[in-house]
């Protein structure tokens, strides 16, 4: 019996990166786009906003 889930193996790796180094997790998801630079700014303002934004980007794509 398998449970269908929207999270893949690579997503788990990105989620762990998003918690440890938020900009790296976003980079692996979207590259050097607007979300990457926004995440760097958010991470500089406070580590928690960077993590929240990184998780949002990874989980909504």
Image (cartoon, rainbow, N blue to C red):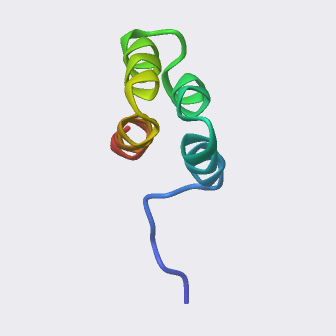
In percent of the image, x 45 and y 72: which residue is there?
4
Q: Where does residue 54 sit, x and y in percent of width and height?
A: 43, 36
Q: Quadrant of residue 41?
A: top left
Is 49 in front, or is 16? Answer: 49
Q: Where does residue 52 sit, x and y in percent of width and height?
A: 37, 43
For this view, does 13 lie left or right of residue 2?
Answer: right
Quarter placement of the C terminus = top left
For this view, does 21 lie left or right of residue 51?
Answer: right
Quarter placement of the N terminus = bottom right
In percent of the image, x 48 and y 79: which residue is there?
3
In percent of the image, x 38 and y 25: which residue is there?
45
Is 30 in front, or is 53? Answer: 53
In percent of the image, x 45 and y 28: which residue is there?
43
Looking at this rendering, what residue extends furthest in the bottom direction? 1
Q: Where does residue 60 sit, x and y in percent of width and height?
A: 33, 42
Is 4 in front, or is 59? Answer: 59
Q: Where does residue 58 sit, x and y in percent of width and height?
A: 44, 40
How many numbered marks does the figure carry?
A: 0
Q: Quadrant of residue 51?
A: top left
């Amino acid at each position: 019996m398998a449970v269908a889930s929207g999270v893949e193996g690579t997503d788990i790796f990105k989620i762990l990166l998003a918690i440890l180094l938020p900009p790296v997790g976003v980079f692996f998801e979207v590259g050097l786009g607007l979300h990457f630079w926004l995440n760097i700014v958010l991470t500089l303002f406070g580590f928690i906003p960077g993590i929240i934004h990184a998780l949002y980007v990874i989980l909504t794509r």
